Image (cartoon, rainbow, N blue to C red):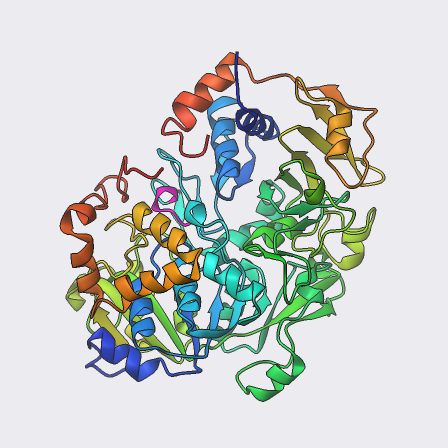
Amino acid sequence: MNYTLREMMTIMAAREIHDGDIVFCGTGISMLAAMAAKHINAPNSITFFETGAIDSKLEEIPLAVSDSRVMYWAASNGGLLDAFAAMQNRITGDHVIGILGAAQVDKFGNLNSTSIGDYYRPDARFPGSGGACDVASFVPRCIIFMQHEKRKFPNKVDYLTSPGYLDGPGGREKAGLMTGGPTAVVTNLGVMRFDDKTKEMYLACYYPGITPQKILDNMEFSVDITRAKEAAPPTERELKILREEVDPQKIIL
Amino acid sequence: MGTNAGKVMPLEEAISRFVKDGCHLSIGGFTLNRNPMAAVFEIIRQKKKNLHCYAHSNGTGIDELIGAGCVSRLEIAYGGNGKAAPTCIRFRAAIQRGEIQFEDYSNYQMSLRFHAGAMGLPFIPTRSGMGTDIVNFWGFSQETRAKDSKLPKKKLEVVDNPFEGWCGATKVILLPAINPDVTIIHVQKADRFGTCRMEGLTYCDTEQAKAAKNVIVTCDELVDPELLRKTPEANQIPFIHVSAVVHVPFGAYPTACYNYYDYDPQYLAQASKFAKDDKLYGDYLNHFVYGVKNHQELLDMMGSERLVKLAADKRTGYATNLDRR
């Protein structure tokens, strides 16, 4: 069955979400992954937005986390303070999985969504943290969406907006952050994970038709590829649900 | 704040009375929802200058204020606007060209800062952001901070938890409070004294309003006080915080207003296209902002056929099946 890389990425991220997880999602493909998980493999997962909506009934895809579509049939419509408090608070925060995107990610999963070049007069300015730094600071698990390109996987991020493992093992604790950090980086070529001991990124799987070498060619730093396996492509059921129930209007797909 | 009656006034008057050149301003809403757009356009028409803006993720409104040259300093968490502009275009241009001074925080940090301002605290702690460049890079120079008595001397401060590991925290970040000179919000319903009822998400509007010296409320419906008093638990902002009330139907347009109307995807996409080019953006402002006397004239220009399509569905609160591609 034919599928696009975007569909593959969405399904790979959806598979990271466990039933019962509280899923913090942003806009675009991260929202799609959260919705796909709920429809496919994690029916009791709960979508959660930084704007304050929790367990919304997403009959249509929201174009932003402020979209009125996230307000419909929510358990409650609060505000930003409510949303972030639920993640900073360990009682609920420990059950949240975040989905984030960025312009750059380094080998320890630190993210840049602020700027490229000199901070004060950047070559390229991006939106900034939004809630990403907060989520990355608070929650124990994070999925990161990236396009696999050399400049997006640099040795050092130009600006560290959202904390991954900072400078490696013990880095978060030393800085005063809660334990946690990214668990998977889902790209258009494969999925990377982080070594339990070194906290460094390694290649966990590559998509059918992609080689581990191609992935290395698209990164400035090198990662361990010895653990990499070929990923299982999306199943017919996954694709059907994604296309017909999750985004029938083809707004993001 | 204001305990008196007589707060209802035209938008032109509310803006000219409370929004002064160089004042510290925050606006309500979030990216493409419930931005006080009628007020934003009026600020642009009145050619206000050197505004110091505080924003968490106030996409549409802040980007227009920056594009029109009203803003000289910005404290912000997120300059993006959904599908129409993943990075707000005039915001990006202004920073890349060095036209505005800016300071980056996160959404929670900005929200907490308004919350502290509303509580009368000098600062507030959080566990968000340690080890990041939000801590390391300060946008405003010491000189800028020293010159304006309304700016704290520091962006933030990381300190050891004085309660020695209580709640598992070794360190926290202290964030300075924000007390804007003016906060402008757009709400679904308000009465003539300024009591507000927001429907759907409140974002950070309540804290932004309660932290401000003056609050301008624009509302889609100016309702009888009795209607709000019957269910006070549904009201978020009591009248004591509010200085001016302005009745502006479709006052959040082209952003959305839950239960009333959706965002206008066509307007947002078109504005983004214009924003990419200085000359086109100038033409856009001349036509859609300076070219009309007030918000009603902008709505008339859009035409009722277009606005009807944005009308919120009664069941869901948004315009179902709206063409959003």
Q: Residue at x 66, y 40 (%)?
A: A141
Residue B179 located left or right of residue B182: right
Q: Quadrant of the C terminus of chain B?
A: top left
Q: Position of residue B89 (x, y in %)?
A: 47, 57
Q: Residue at x 62, y 87 (%)?
A: B146
Magenta-colored segment: predominant secondary structure: helix
On screen, B170 above or below B122?
above
Tell me which segment is drawn in magenta. A66-70
Residue A237 located left or right of residue A112: left
On screen, B19 above or below B234?
below
Q: Position of residue B67 (x, y in %)?
A: 42, 66
Foreground of the two, A147 or A226 = A147
Foreground of the two, A144 or A138 = A144
Q: Residue at x 41, y 74 (%)?
A: B70
Q: Residue at x 85, y 38 (%)?
A: A197
Q: Position of residue A249 (x, y in %)?
A: 36, 29
